[in-house]
């Protein structure tokens, strides 16, 4: 998702009257770009990855790990760090993500088509993590950057760390578990997406996910906080916010093919791998400390 740096997002009431017009503009633009580029050839085959990190705080005395909402503080420092890098050190581009405990690191220069580039990926990922961890370590010896798709206690209890020792979790009326302060202040578009989705549907989103059943799982399993909610289902976990999904981290890979034909060939070759990757990603998923199938 692009980062909105200028202007103000429209509210849903402002979008409705012009919605069809902009759909028409978007479709027209897509057709024109396609007609212009469909026969183009000659670009080098390049690729790159986008790696998202989670910031956490460890309280060893209480044996508690919580999400650390400090992405807005360390991102400017990470950007400055990479302005000062030497020629023999790869530069990293750092970007905000949907939530304030997430940061995204991307190599400034893409990888090439030679197999030797594969040998540089792990070192570059290590450098990204090292840069973020060095800044966190300057602030505290209890703050860490980790790679994890879903924070296990996301939305459960006191899952956000507060440096002021204020354990209150201000939660909007639309969500039982997710406070607005999770949203990144660098990403005004993200907050508008949450607000406009609520305005459009006139209700909080409700996502049903089957519970992972073992010998200790009650039958039926009931996600009690949502029991009075319309659409409630037995034997399911209920996620009641867009942030339940937007707050997940992932690894993304982007390719530049030399032509549309090569692009289609790469797409077809990668397609069989997606099922395997999805199975690995969903091998163990946890929300509200419940394990679920997906």
Image (cartoon, helix red, strand yellow):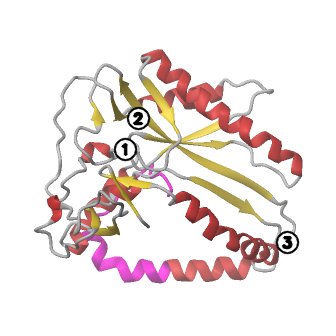
Corner quadrant of residue 100:
top left
For the residues labelled 3 and 2, the Cα–Cα distance comes to: 41 Å
Question: Extreme left residue here?
Answer: 228
| Tag of residue 184 | 1
Write the residue at 35% across / 42% down.
185
Q: Give the residue pinned by disc 2.
A: 72
Instruction: Give coordinates of residue 46: x percent, y percent.
Output: 79, 56
Cβ–Cβ below 8 Å for labels 2 and 1?
A: yes
Write the residue at 48% across / 50% down.
149
Q: Residues within 10 Å of mark 3 (few under 14, many from 20)?
A: few
Q: Is residue 8 visible?
A: no
Callout in the foreground (3, 2): 2
Q: Give the residue pinned by disc 3.
A: 41
For the residues labelled 2 and 1, the Cα–Cα distance comes to: 7 Å
Q: Which segment did they paint magenta?
A: 1-25
Q: Along the polypeptide, which appears first: circle 3 or circle 1? A: 3
Write the residue at 13% across / 56% down.
173
Q: Along the polypeptide, which appears first: circle 2 or circle 1? A: 2
Foreground: 38 or 93?
93
| Residue 41 highlighted magenta (yes or no) | no
For the residues labelled 3 and 1, the Cα–Cα distance comes to: 39 Å
The kind of secondary structure element at disc 3 is loop
Q: Along the polypeptide, which appears first: circle 3 or circle 2? A: 3
> What quarter of the picture does the C terminus occupy?
bottom left
């Amino acid at each position: 998702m692009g980062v909105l740096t200028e202007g103000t997002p429209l509210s849903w009431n402002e979008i409705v009257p012009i919605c069809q017009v902009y759909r028409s503009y978007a479709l027209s633009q897509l057709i024109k770009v396609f007609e212009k580029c469909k026969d183009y050839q000659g670009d080098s085959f390049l690729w790159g990855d986008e790696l998202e990190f989670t910031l956490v705080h460890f309280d060893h005395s209480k044996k508690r790990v919580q999400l650390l909402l400090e992405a807005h503080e360390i991102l400017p420092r990470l950007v400055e760090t990479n302005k000062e890098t030497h020629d023999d050190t790869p530069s990293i581009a750092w970007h905000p993500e949907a939530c304030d405990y997430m940061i995204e690191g991307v190599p400034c220069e893409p990888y090439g088509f030679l197999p030797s580039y594969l040998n540089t990926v792990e070192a570059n990922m290590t450098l990204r993590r090292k840069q973020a961890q060095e800044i966190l370590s300057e602030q505290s010896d209890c703050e860490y950057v980790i790679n994890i798709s879903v924070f296990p206690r996301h939305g459960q209890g006191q899952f956000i760390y507060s440096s002021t020792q204020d354990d209150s979790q201000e939660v909007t009326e639309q969500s039982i578990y997710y406070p607005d302060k999770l949203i990144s202040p660098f990403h005004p578009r993200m907050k508008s997406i949450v607000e406009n989705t609520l305005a459009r549907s006139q209700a909080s989103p409700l996502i049903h996910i089957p519970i992972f059943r073992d010998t200790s799982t009650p039958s039926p399993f009931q996600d009690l906080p949502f029991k009075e909610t319309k659409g409630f289902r037995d034997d399911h976990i209920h996620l009641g916010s867009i942030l339940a999904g937007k707050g997940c981290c992932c690894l993304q890979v982007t390719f530049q093919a030399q032509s549309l034909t090569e692009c289609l060939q790469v797409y077809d070759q990668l397609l069989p791998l997606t099922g395997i990757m999805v199975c690995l990603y969903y091998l163990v998923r946890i929300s509200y400390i419940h394990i679920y199938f997906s």
